């Protein structure tokens, strides 16, 4: 299964997923990535999250949906 989702900066992702004043810090998002709670990458100190990640949706569910979508095309 190939991931076709693009990376977006963590700040942009956080502003999409959280209300103003409730956004987690980049280091928190980085910890989530390292613990496997969301898919993303830390590249040269910059934190990125895959655009298909949604806060509160377990990673196993996201993976299953990605697999089903890939199989349907």
Image: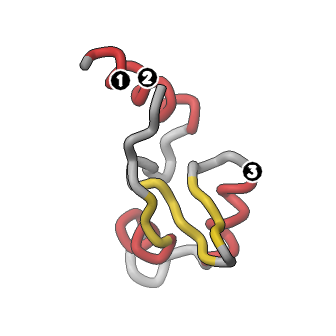
Horizontally, is 24 left or right of 6 in the view? right
Q: Residues within 10 Å of mark 3 (few under 14, many from 20)?
A: few
Q: Secondary structure at mark 3?
A: loop
Q: List x then y, in percent, for residue 55.
A: 48, 53
Up-down: is 18 above or below 45? above
Q: Quadrant where the C terminus lies? A: top left
Residue for badge 1: 70
Up-down: is 15 above or below 60? below
- Depth-wise, is mark 3 or mark 2 nearer the camera? 2
Q: Nearer the viewer, residue 9 or 54?
A: 9
Of callouts 1 and 3, which one flags the residue occurring earlier in the amino acid sequence? 3
Q: Residues within 10 Å of mark 2 (few under 14, many from 20)?
A: some
Q: Which residue is located at x 72 percent, y 63 percent?
A: 31
Q: Which residue is located at x 51 percent, y 71 percent?
A: 10
Q: Secondary structure at mark 2?
A: helix
Give the numbered dot on residue 67.
Answer: 2
Of callouts 3 and 2, which one flags the residue occurring earlier in the amino acid sequence? 3
Up-down: is 16 above or below 65? below
Residue for badge 3: 35
Up-down: is 29 above or below 34? below
- Disc 1 + disc 3, Cβ < 8 Å: no
- Disc 2 + disc 1, Cβ < 8 Å: yes
Label 1 vs label 3: CA separation? 25 Å
* Residue reaching furthest to the bottom: 21
Q: Which residue is located at x 38 percent, y 42 percent?
A: 4
Label 3 vs label 2: CA separation? 21 Å
């Amino acid at each position: 299964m190939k991931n076709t989702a693009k990376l977006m900066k963590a700040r942009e992702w956080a502003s999409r997923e959280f209300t103003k004043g409730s956004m987690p810090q980049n280091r928190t998002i980085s910890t989530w990535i390292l613990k496997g709670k969301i898919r993303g990458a830390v590249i040269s100190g910059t934190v990125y999250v895959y655009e298909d990640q949604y806060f509160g949706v377990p990673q196993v569910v996201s993976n299953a949906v990605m697999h089903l979508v890939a199989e349907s095309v």
